Amino acid sequence: MQPLGDRRMYLPRVEAPRWVVFADFDETYLAHDGAPERRRDRRALEQFLIEEARARGIVFGWVADGPVDAVSESVAAHGLRVLPHFLASSRGAEIELFSREGGRRPWPEWEARLAAGGLFSRARVLAAVSDVERRGLKLERREHGRRLERYRFEPARASRIHEALGWIRQAADRHGVAAHAAPCHPALGDPEGAYDIDFIPRGAGKKQVVEFVLERLGLPRSRAVSFGDDVGDLEMLNAVEHGYLVDNATDEARRRFSRTAGASYARGILDVMERRIERPAAFA
């Protein structure tokens, strides 16, 4: 694993959280095209978080579909300077905390919660995949992490995709794991019409991350903001009162969720936070 926290800046500790912000990582917080204007917008967002997180009471986190090693590689490749307060990776199966005082560490209560939900193992996933392939569906193994096994599924007929995804979820459930399906992302070079199938522990997922973090911080849904760019983020957007698609969102996501940030990538996140989250009177 790459040292995600090395030579990066930590956000200031927020003693009295007033808001929590959940930002999908790939193609929401981070624009993988590396365009100069995208880098400028991201650095403006980083600077805002450094200067305003404590004053406005903002706890800020990334929620990534891929495993933590993939996030770490992107952080290094794109020169991200500032780490969030927390990172939920592997589609929410792992949550780590970052702080100047404590460095990088797992969130203990989340670890305990998933441990109570049952064992996650590659053997269980392989058993589920075997069940699926006996129905004539081919799954290609892609990324993997401690609590993630990602496969790609390219359906032969689009008309039967919902039936096929139902079989995959049923097979996962029979073997004691969960399966989350979402269309692959063309902006990341994925093929059109293909699906990512993420096998993760039961009780994990982006919605569950939102619920857990709100519970731990003692905040209601009305004090939560989330950002995403594709249909895999919709459960996270619907889990809070203030959910937004960034303006570079996929067409399918826009068909299914209407509220947008008014700008793309980090600029959209920054604009919403600046206008939605005000400083309390003591800091004004």
Image (cartoon, rainbow, N blue to C red):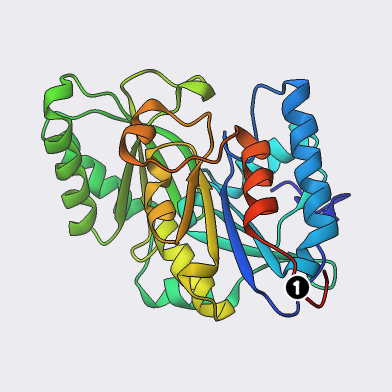
Residue 34 in view in this figure: yes
Residue closer to the observer: 240 or 259: 259
Q: Is residue 231 left or right of residue 37?
A: left
Callout 1 secondary element: loop
Residue 65 in view in this figure: no
Q: How many marks?
A: 1
Residue labelled with disc 1: 14
The residue lying at 45 percent from left, 27 percent from top is 185
The residue lying at 17 percent from left, 58 percent from top is 174
Residue closer to the observer: 228 or 145: 228
Q: Is residue 141 left or right of residue 177?
A: right
Height in image: 24 above or below 42?
A: below
Height in image: 93 above or below 256?
A: below
The quadrant the C terminus occupies is bottom right
Expressed as whole percent of the image width and height from the top left, the position of residue 88 reads 56, 57
Residue closer to the observer: 156 or 138: 156
Height in image: 89 above or below 203?
A: above
Q: Is residue 261 left or right of residue 96?
A: left
Q: Is residue 147 left or right of residue 254?
A: right
Give the amino acid type for the residue marked by disc 1 in the picture.
Answer: Val
Expressed as whole percent of the image width and height from the top left, the position of residue 76 reads 77, 37
Expressed as whole percent of the image width and height from the top left, the position of residue 128 reads 23, 48
Expressed as whole percent of the image width and height from the top left, the position of residue 232 reads 39, 42
Residue closer to the observer: 82 or 275: 275
Residue 252: name its quadrant.
Answer: top left
